[in-house]
Image (cartoon, helix red, strand yellow):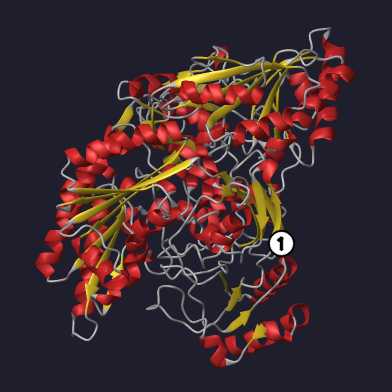
Amino acid sequence: MTGRSPLDTLKATGVPVREAVPEDAVAGVLPSWVAAPGGVGEVAEIMRAASSLGLAVVPSGGRTKAAWGRPPERCDLVVDTRAMDRVLEHEAGDLVVRVQAGVTLDGLAAALAVHGQELALDRPLDGATVGGTLATATAGPRALRYGTARDLLIGITVVLADGTVATSGGKVVKNVAGYDLGKLFTGSYGTLGVIAEAAFRLHPMAAERACVTSAHPVSEDLGPLLRRVTAAQEEVSAVEIDWPDPREPYTLTCLVEGVGAQSRASAVRELLGTRASVGGEPPGEWARLPGETFVLEARVRQDDLYDAMLAVAGTVRVTGVEAAVRGWAAPVSVLRIALRTDDGPAAGDAAGAAFVTALRDMVEPGGRVVVVTAPEEIARRVDRFGHIGALPLMKRVKERFDPDRSLSPGRFVGGI
Amino acid sequence: MPGDTLTLLADRLRGPLGDQWVITDPVRLRTYECDGLTYHRATPGLVVLPETAEQVSAVVRACAEAGVPFVARGAGTGLSGGALPRTDGVLIVMSRMRRILSIDLPNRRAVVEPGVTNLAVTEAVRADGYYYAPDPSSQQVCSIGGNVAENSGGAHCLKYGFTVNHILALEIVSPDGDIMQLDALDPGYDLLGAFIGSEGTLGVATKITVRLTRAPEVVTTVLAAFPGVAAGGKAVSAIIGSGIVPAAIEMMDALAIEAAEAAVACRYPEGAGAVLIVELDGPAAEVAGHFEQVERICREEGAFEIRVADDPAERAAIWKGRKSAFAAVGRISPAYIVQDGVVPRTALPGVLARIAELSAEHGIRVANVFHAGDGNLHPLVLFDDAEPGAGERAEHVSGMILDLCIEHGGSITGEHGVGVDKARYMPKMFTEDDLDTMQLVRCAFDPKGLSNPGKVFPTPRLCGEVPGVRKGVHPLVESGKAEQF
């Protein structure tokens, strides 16, 4: 039993495993090894081996959000899902697709477009995988009409820390048999298990799309505009707010999809005033993250969006931190706020942390402010997640799913 | 002694709830012995009717401390025995908690208590041009709390989704009696999503924030009569394949139509072997475009009569037969079993043909009423309960239909829930590991297994103590104060 190294044990599973290189770091923490399973069976093999060795495992996809969340307390093995990039099943007539978790949203979109269908999720980052999108619950403006990943997910297969493979849901759009593990794993940041496969409900691609764009000074209350636009019977699919500088006007883009989109968009324009214009496809920056290294998310109710914007503008004024904002209206409305603190590390860090605290003071308790990603120095000074009502229950869920805390330990709220 | 335990519990709860809301009289207890699925019956050991979340919390806490199981009951319209009481437990009846607490149109949401009926939410906002989208057939009487427990659907969930897509926050009483908030705004595990559809096994919802949906500009309902279900099924596939997502697509076969005619004289086209109801809603321009396509497709697939409704009265006339179908079957059969299987849409024609074969092979009539758009079958398996062995044969056919759904990659329940009725089919659809993993959630919420036990899962998982860190030696062992066995 002696003499065999952990790497040998991992390699004995037959799953490709290599020594980690600096580019494999997760939120700044370097793993020892990286495994690249090709399917759910291999994920189970590698998880069993890792479990027998007592290794801490962090799942990873397209690495677009590897810096999100808290740095893992331990990180021995990264399970890289990128080799799991197959579309397993797509019966176009069922408007359902089943994929491996390492499929990228871009790749999936291309495969589905051939059949005139789409997974109605926005794509904030190029190269993001299905698994990573689910694990971080990333959403976009089209949430207004289509919901978010959790609403389109109809089945999931996960591998737990000990190698147990579990599936819930299925590949039919209507199904209430058993608990919905998909919901639980959406937004779980790799702390409950490795997402290996997922099935989604699809939508037919819109026959026509049109956008209504209008610029508004910060002094103009967004509330009444939003109420009008989202109540319009022309059915707006999404409303995006693009606000590259909170001291300047913001731009609203309303997306209208489906038959008669152009004429419906013209009707929506009337609601937004004379400055609005109707165009075709959404702008190139649609749904994109407004920055990379230091991004906050304010999550509020639709009618609180404007107050949240004023809170951002006020915080920019008080802290002197530069910000760029992009957000959208939905039942959970979101402002993504990218901060720039490049005026000298120490002062910048303090200002960045002050920004988070000040903004949170204004947005809570009606809303939430989450630090999506931040430079390490700043992240250390602030509470990343803020208030979460059901945190004790989340901890209990973690204890049951991962009693040894070997999956992405400490990555998530409250040390989960 | 469970009897003594329940007596003590009743005494303890009279204070916080008030005497008249703690029911121990056997005759009154018996009125709660079943839900909408009447062939599962059990008289509850004790019934309580709380009026506030604090009272629910007091009841649940008392149960947790006494180790007594509890079952929450909404309107009792469920079709899977999900609210079947426990003879050794407490039935928590939510019907007194029926206030609409707030309506917030700018935020498109309303906060309601669990006993509020589904339709009451829509009624409260209809004049303002909004409604609550999930619409189970029982929406006049079923409660929002029950909808949350079952993740209820309805005819229009093809386009609008299920209860889980329309709930923004919940206040729940956890199985140890704590009042907790689950909110879609919160980052982290989607416990809100996990709770909805857990059939009362993770706690009791006491306050529900629902999403309100803007009423569509136009609703057009089309009734198309086909010579048989095969042609109707092909029309369904063609409509979906053309890129239209109708609000609803419903189908009834000849036997279901016969029943509906007998019951409510819905006057569907004579000689129809199947009728398809397609409802389109949304912006006028879009509905008009889609309507043209739907009409053309139906004609191409052999529809011999098409009726169109553009106003509520005409629409009600079309829906009348469909909505009455379950009850109507009573007119043509003394007894029946309703199934709720789901298959992928594209498997519908094959599955319907096989159901017809099964029906013929076993001499059991099966009437088909279903949400064709999402492959959700509601076969009504008809039998005469006076005839010896007929019930067993019907049960057998009914089970074979579920097997058929599973074989085609479908589900044993699309909207009625597992409850007690389908728990035994769960192992056919899921592996032991799947079910054990699901029950980890149960163990997190309810380690003692007191919240609606015996539902959903065929075999309860013993949760044990909270596991904690298993690696390393326990400090008591390490210090020599205890030994590990």
Q: Nearer the viewer, residue B30 or B88?
A: B30
Q: As drawn, which residue projects farthest toward the right?
A: A318
| Residue B295 placement, left or right of A402 | left
Q: As drawn, which residue projects farthest toward the top?
A: A343
Q: Nearer the viewer, residue A317 or B70?
A: A317
Q: Position of residue A392 (x, y in %)?
A: 69, 50
Q: Position of residue A89 (x, y in %)?
A: 29, 33
| Residue B455 placement, left or right of A290 | left
Residue B384, relative to residue A337: is it above or below? below
Q: Nearer the viewer, residue B42 or B146?
A: B146
Say which residue appears at 52% left-offset and 68% top-offset: B141
Q: Amino acid at mark 1?
A: Asp
Instruction: Name the quadrant containing residue B59.
Output: bottom right
Residue A125, relative to residue B68: is it above or below? above
Q: From where the camera sits, is residue B60 visible? A: yes
Quadrant location of the N terminus of chain A in the rendered image: top left
Q: Which residue is mark 1?
A: B178
| Residue A78 placement, left or right of B434 | right
Say which residue appears at 71% left-offset and 36% top-offset: A303
Q: Nearer the viewer, residue B349 or B195?
A: B349
Q: From where the camera sits, is residue A140 visible? A: no
Q: Position of residue A324 (x, y in %)?
A: 72, 15
Helix, strand or loop at mark 1: loop
Query: Which chain contains the residue that carries disc 1?
Result: B
Q: Residues within 10 Å of mark 1 (few under 14, many from 20)?
A: some
